[in-house]
């Protein structure tokens, strides 16, 4: 029956077209993710964590420190925590250099955990 096989062929063609479209969309999304855009500024925060005040905010003008943090600074009890942002968007601080975390707030909390009540010493400007 030529009629049915023709319909089948059309259905198959339509299915292929849908699949091709889906693949096209997926490819577009993947290449967008590969693209390195400037990363968005993290959320500002100000809280007391385990009795220490931790703050994160965009760096004010006249930054006295080079910007590994992409223009974002974190303070513990008013002392700047040396923070660095990795290429994958995770963060490390000078206190926990080998344990990347998702946000500057998480890095600040990890630093407080690590310090165990010790004061944070200002990192010498370099
Ligand atoms: Cu630095």
Image (spheres, rainbow, N blue to C red):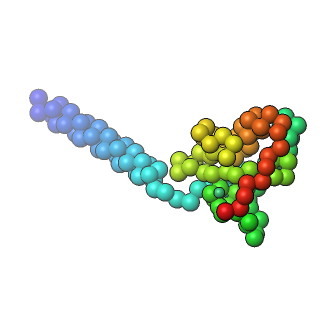
Location of residue 68 (image quadrant)? bottom right
Where 33 sits versus 125, above or below?
above
Where 68 sits versus 5, above or below?
below
Residue pushed farthest bottom?
62
| Picture coordinates of residue 6, whole percent (x, y) | 16, 36
Residue pushed farthest right?
51
| Residue 47 seen in render | no
Residue at x 74% of width, y 43% of height: 108
**53 sits to left or right of 34:** right
Q: Nearer the viewer, residue 35 or 93?
A: 93
**38 sits to left or right of 115:** left
Position of the C terminus by quadrant: bottom right
Residue at x 73% of width, y 40% of height: 111
Residue at x 11% of width, y 29% of height: 1
Split into quadrants, the picture shows ligand 1 in the one at bottom right
Where 113 sits versus 125, above or below?
above
Q: Nearer the viewer, residue 102 or 21?
A: 102
| Picture coordinates of residue 75, whole percent (x, y) | 79, 51
| Picture coordinates of residue 110, whole percent (x, y) | 72, 37
Residue at x 88% of width, y 37% of height: 51
| Picture coordinates of residue 122, whole percent (x, y) | 78, 53
Q: Nearer the viewer, residue 15 or 112?
A: 112
Where 80 sits versus 18, above or below?
below
Location of residue 64 (image quadrant)? bottom right
């Amino acid at each position: 029956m030529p009629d049915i096989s023709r319909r089948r062929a059309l259905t198959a063609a339509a299915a292929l077209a849908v699949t091709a479209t889906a693949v096209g969309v997926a490819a577009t999304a993947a290449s967008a993710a590969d693209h390195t855009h400037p990363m968005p500024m993290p959320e500002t925060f100000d809280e007391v964590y385990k009795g220490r005040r931790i703050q994160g905010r965009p760096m004010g003008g006249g930054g006295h420190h080079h910007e590994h943090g992409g223009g974002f600074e974190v303070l513990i009890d008013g002392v700047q925590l040396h923070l660095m942002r990795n290429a994958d968007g995770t963060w490390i601080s000078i206190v926990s250099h080998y344990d990347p975390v998702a946000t500057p707030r998480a890095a600040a909390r990890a630093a407080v955990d690590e310090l165990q009540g010790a004061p944070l010493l200002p990192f010498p400007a370099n």
